[in-house]
Amino acid sequence: MRAVVPYCVEEPKTRLSPLLDADERASFARTMLADVLAAVEGAGGRPEVLATAPVDVGVDRPVVVDDRPLSAAVNAALEERSVGEAPVAVVMADLALATPDALAGLFGAEGDVVLAPGRGGGTNALVCRHPEFRVDYHGVSYRDHREVCAAVGADAAVVDSYRLGTDVDDPADLAEVLLHADGRAADWLRERGFAVAADGGRVRVRRE
Amino acid sequence: MRAVVPYCVEEPKTRLSPLLDADERASFARTMLADVLAAVEGAGGRPEVLATAPVDVGVDRPVVVDDRPLSAAVNAALEERSVGEAPVAVVMADLALATPDALAGLFGAEGDVVLAPGRGGGTNALVCRHPEFRVDYHGVSYRDHREVCAAVGADAAVVDSYRLGTDVDDPADLAEVLLHADGRAADWLRERGFAVAADGGRVRVRRE
């Protein structure tokens, strides 16, 4: 399955600025992207980076540059698909916990549109097999995408995955990477001194 | 499968105090408990409430009172099991997103110990089939439970479930209930005026 992986080249992961400087955030974001691309391939997908600007993703994968906002760029990819027959997946580039198994569950699920919800109402990954479905990532996208499905008569399915539900945006999310991922992003954090710590009942990351 | 559902009667869900007063928190906690008990039964489990004090759970289900701390009380239940043969599950009472399908996935997974991780290093649900496995919910319990498995020679398996990974502790978690649950807890919130709102890109709950 063709799998579009949107990637914002400019100032990625600004909410990690309490812990990482701008260069580190860019490096960490590219590392998560590499993990996601590998997981997509491991699930039998053909990843295609949809970047806001030219970017060296460090591996030999197609990169399409589209500097429009996220939803517009993804919808262009869906429109292109809708003249064909094949399904297309959209997988966010910060799913550092994604594994081939988790993505195979998404790719293999039946439904005109299959959604993998993310924490806080997001849509972390999806599969589209319906010609009229379009995305809107602004706001409560999971709810909105279900409404879009209803409006265009598409059967919506939902996959239940902690790994796909965990996008890495906030400092607390780094603990999820350290606890549950074993790819490049987890190594990247460990090499820079990050570790999980229990602090009065709450789990956080510390940097040595 | 026998499924122990620990329930803290005294001052439950204190982290929801910015949104709910003490009586509301107690009522909401009991409502989530009722949803969890129903989901366990829907998955073919036999739920048993392990409460810190006598409590009316509103339905005809066995309640065992044990006023020791959580880990000690759960370990007493596991020790009781270890003289028998049958597996025992431990399912937290605040998994308002749990469905029969999600719990059936846990109950049916192979492994001496099966863990359903929760956000922040927690262990939201587990199945124990090994006589020496014991719990320790303090700190980073997911990591600790894997170490306990290694120490006693138990095969550890992990289920990948967003629904089981979402325990309801913080105000932000109420949005998860409203977006993804359709049981009593979601109704309880809606009846009291809670709704999901997108606020500058972040999703939160508001109360009318």
Image (spheres, coloured by chain):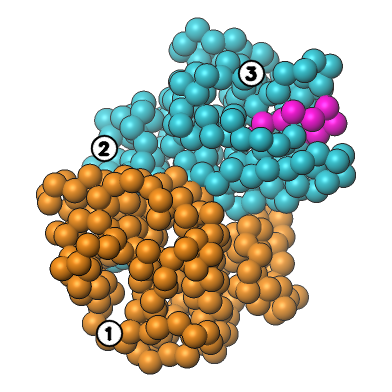
Chain colours: A cyan, B orange
Around disc 3, counting alpha carbons within 10 Å, would you say few (fewer than 14), some (14 to 19), or many (20 or more)?
some
The magenta segment is A126-134
Which label number is shown at residue A2? 3
> Tag 3, which secondary structure?
strand
Quadrant (top left, top right, bottom left, bottom right) of the C terminus of chain B: bottom right
> Tag 1, which secondary structure?
loop
Q: Are marks 1 and 2 on the same chain?
A: no
Chain for numbered disc 2: A
Q: CA distance from mark 1 to mark 3?
A: 54 Å
Q: Which residue is denoted by mark 1 in the rendering?
A: B66
Query: Residue extending furthest front?
Result: B85
Q: Callout 3, which amino acid? A: Arg
Whole-percent x and y of residue A178? 33, 41
Whole-percent x and y of residue A31? 43, 25
Q: Is residue B20 left or right of residue A24?
A: right
Chain for numbered disc 3: A
Query: Against B72, is B154 above or below?
Result: above
> Tag 2, which secondary structure?
loop
Q: Are marks 1 and 3 on the same chain?
A: no
Q: Which residue is denoted by mark 2 in the rendering?
A: A193
Q: Residue at x 42, y 71 (%)?
A: B46
Q: Residue at x 46, y 76 (%)?
A: B13
